[in-house]
Amino acid sequence: MEHDDRIILGIDPGTNIMGFGVIGVSGKKLEMKDMGVLDIRKETDAYIKLKTIFDTTLTLIDRFMPDELAIEAPFYGKNVQSMLKLGRAQGTAISAALSRDIPVFEYAPRKIKLSITGVGQASKEQVASMLEQLFGFKDATKSLDATDGLAVAVCHYYQAMPAQKKSSAKSWEEFIRKNPGRIG
């Protein structure tokens, strides 16, 4: 199955801040098309927040015409109310994609970090730094929610590349040697 010339929308869902990133794929070449955040911290009505997430996701879909949506799965925390809110935000973004017949792919936070940095426990700053190198932009740490959204899209791209999918690198040097296309 060939995956040339496609666009992937990545979303890091949240009820206060939703990060997103859009990448274009042409063969094995990646291009960052956009990244940013939806900041809805000032909105107090939970249902208006969900509507805003839905509308913003549709706007991104209509603007970039992605072939696929990749979204971060909620991680399992101790606070049930936080998990419920995050699940609603995720479900809202998924619903927007499905309303436009866009296939959805879900990734655990650990899987995303592992695919970007080679380390499943990497920090948001480490993920942002690797994405800076990959795409050649600066100051990614100023908006970690945006780079988290971008990371989800890049993670999805890497999952479609069987040769790079199963990395057993024991060190950064080995990881870089085995994955030359993933480093700036």
Image (spheres, grey):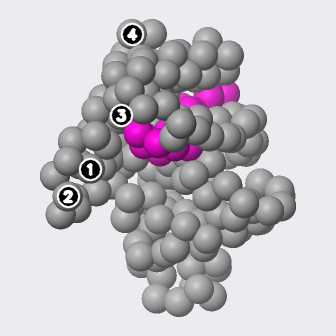
Amino acid marked by disc 4: Ser
Q: CA distance from mark 2 to mark 4?
A: 30 Å
Residue 27 seen in this snapshot: no
Report which residue position mark 3 lands on. 89
CB-based contact (under 8 Å), mark 2 and mark 1:
yes
Q: CA distance from mark 3 to mark 4?
A: 15 Å
Is disc 2 placed on a helix, strand or loop?
loop
Q: Is residue 139 left or right of residue 72?
A: right
Amino acid marked by disc 1: Ser
Residue at the (48%, 82%) spot, across then down: 169
Please rate how many residues cluster around mark 1, counting C-alpha atoms within 10 Å: few if below 14, some from 14 to 19, many from 20: some
Q: Earlier in the sequence, mark 3 or mark 1?
A: 1
Q: Position of residue 64 (x, y in %)?
A: 66, 20
Pick whichever, 134 or 29, lies toward us.
134
Label annotation for residue 99 = 4
Residue at the (34%, 22%) spot, across then down: 47
